[in-house]
């Protein structure tokens, strides 16, 4: 496989999987510009170059060279498995609210599917009603559903 072919395959996957449109467009444009016509045979050095380029835009894309081969590429993006609503509820969607003086702290440790996280977000915002300021604590957050983040930030 040539570098240009790998770049093209990566951008096709990014178009289907990367939700942040502006960042995705910057990354796919950078990959096309740098590697689109690159006829070099893919090796560890090329993968490292692609990885370094990707890191300038997003930390969520890894490009790894496996010299012994044997990996079977996915034909379709795997997507995320559906969440168990009972599991999300059992931990309160990893959302906690507390008051500190006249301010509030909203801790969001995960971004579960909005469908399951919404009731816990609503309770947390209700608990913070009337505070003068809210501190959003995402330090332990491992990512997840962008819609849930948008709901938090929209409040």
Image: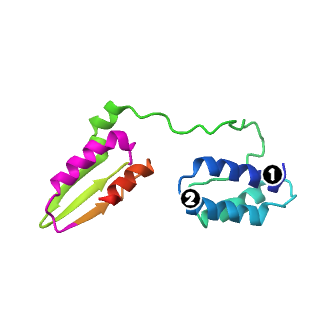
Is 7 placed left or right of 22 in the picture? right
Residue hosting label 1:
5
In the image, residue 121 lies in the stretch drawn in magenta: yes
Q: 105 or 115, which is in the foreground?
A: 115
Q: Position of residue 91 (x, y in %)?
A: 28, 39
* Main secondary structure of the magenta stretch: helix
Note whether 39 is above or below 95 in the view shown: below
Q: Residue at x 12, y 66 (%)?
A: 101
User: Is residue 46 visible in the rendered structure shown here?
Assistant: yes
Residue range in magenta is 111-133
Which one is in front in this view, the residue at disc 2 or the one at disc 1? 2
Is 80 placed left or right of 43 in the picture? left
Instruction: Assess disc 1: are there few (<14), some (14-19) or many (≥20) residues with their C-alpha within 10 Å of its C-alpha.
Output: some
Q: Residue at x 43, y 47 (%)?
A: 145
Note whether 66 is above or below 47 in the view shown: above
Q: Which mark is residue 21?
A: 2
Is tag 2's residue or tag 1's residue first in the polypeptide sequence? Answer: 1
């Amino acid at each position: 496989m040539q570098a240009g072919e790998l770049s093209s395959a990566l951008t096709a996957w990014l178009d289907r999987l990367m939700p942040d449109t502006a960042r995705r467009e910057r990354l796919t444009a950078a990959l096309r510009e740098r590697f689109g016509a690159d006829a070099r045979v893919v090796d560890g050095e090329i993968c490292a170059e692609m990885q370094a380029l990707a890191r300038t835009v997003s930390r969520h894309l890894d490009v790894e060279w496996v010299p012994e081969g044997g990996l079977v590429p996915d034909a379709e993006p795997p997507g995320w498995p559906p969440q168990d609503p009972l599991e999300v509820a059992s931990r309160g969607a990893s959302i906690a609210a507390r008051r500190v003086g006249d301010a509030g702290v909203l801790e969001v440790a995960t971004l579960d599917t909005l469908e399951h996280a919404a009731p816990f977000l609503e309770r947390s915002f209700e608990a913070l009603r009337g505070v003068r300021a809210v501190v959003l604590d995402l330090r332990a957050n491992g990512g997840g559903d962008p819609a849930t983040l948008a709901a938090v930030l929209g409040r």
